[in-house]
Image: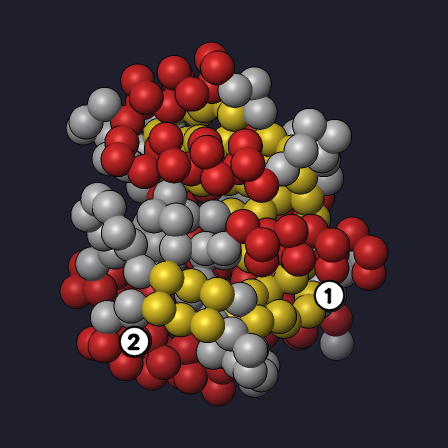
């Protein structure tokens, strides 16, 4: 089974389309579950999510008790039933065909993780805000140099992992979007195997973006330094 974790905060407008995409993309023989983790929504997101789970048994709803993406992702990992866990965003920016490619790659090759990249050959990006793109490339280059690793899209949430790997990372330290940096860096520093593959990404069409770079800059730097320290300590312990 594969578990797809989708954190949701004020995503009422996108929930119906999310359910439709999964229902039309997977047949009844495919073993999967979609876990919607409500992160303190102030609109009718939780009500709508529960309505969907009542009509589509593939969907499960969790209500986060520790506000923030870090808490939502941790709760989802704890309650995931799948052998593999994929994290997707509720803005429908990720392509369901890439999810199926992820699942095939990780299950047939026994990798610990598959890292998608929006910035390699054969990847495709639509409507990425220019300022955000520039900051993304600068920060990911910094992480790449700091960690001495060739991967170039650390901050992209959309990745797949063996469930056992993600559960071994708990409790997660990050409270916000920086959780999506913490997880791949821990994967690398703990020497788990992974493969990089191109993915498609498109900008949000409905609802408001939750990512605020001004509010998150210090959190990303903290996570980078924290994971670098862990990497150095693990290396020292081995020596």
Question: Which residue of the protein is positioned furthest toward the front in this rendering?
Answer: 24
What is the quadrant of residue 69 in the picture? top left
First in residue order: circle 1 vs circle 2: 2
Residue 28, relative to residue 191: is it above or below?
above
What is the quadrant of residue 189 in the picture? bottom right
Residue located at (37% from left, 23% from top): 49
Q: Which mark is residue 133?
A: 2
In this view, the residue in front, 203 or 108, is: 203
Secondary structure of the residue carrying numbered label 2: helix
What is the quadrant of residue 214 in the picture? bottom left
Query: Is residue 71 among what the camera can see?
Result: no
Question: At which x and y percent is residue 4?
Answer: 55, 40
**CA–CA distance in space, label 1 to label 2:** 28 Å
Residue located at (58% from left, 57% from top): 98
Q: Which residue is mark 1?
A: 193
Residue located at (37% from left, 43% from top): 90
């Amino acid at each position: 089974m594969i578990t797809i974790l989708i954190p949701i905060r004020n995503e009422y407008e996108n929930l119906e389309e999310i359910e439709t995409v999964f229902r039309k993309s997977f047949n009844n023989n495919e073993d999967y579950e979609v876990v919607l983790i409500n992160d303190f929504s102030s609109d009718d997101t939780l009500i709508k999510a529960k309505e969907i789970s009542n009509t589509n048994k593939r969907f499960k709803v969790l209500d986060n008790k520790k506000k923030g993406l870090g808490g939502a992702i941790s709760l989802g990992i704890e309650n995931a039933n799948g052998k593999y866990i994929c994290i997707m965003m509720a803005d429908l920016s990720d392509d369901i065909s890439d999810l199926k490619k992820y699942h095939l790659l990780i299950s047939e090759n026994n990798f610990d993780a598959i890292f998608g990249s929006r910035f390699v050959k054969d990847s495709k990006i639509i409507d990425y805000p220019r300022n955000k793109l520039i900051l993304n490339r600068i920060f990911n280059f910094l992480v790449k140099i700091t960690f001495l690793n060739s991967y170039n899209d650390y901050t992209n949430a959309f990745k797949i992992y063996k469930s056992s790997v993600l559960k071994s990372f708990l409790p997660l330290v990050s409270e916000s979007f920086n959780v999506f940096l913490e997880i791949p860096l821990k994967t690398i520093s703990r020497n788990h195997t992974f493969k990089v593959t191109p993915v498609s990404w498109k900008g949000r069409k409905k609802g408001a973006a939750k990512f605020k770079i001004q509010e998150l800059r210090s959190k990303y730097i903290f996570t980078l330094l924290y994971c670098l320290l862990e990497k150095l300590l693990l290396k020292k312990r081995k020596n």
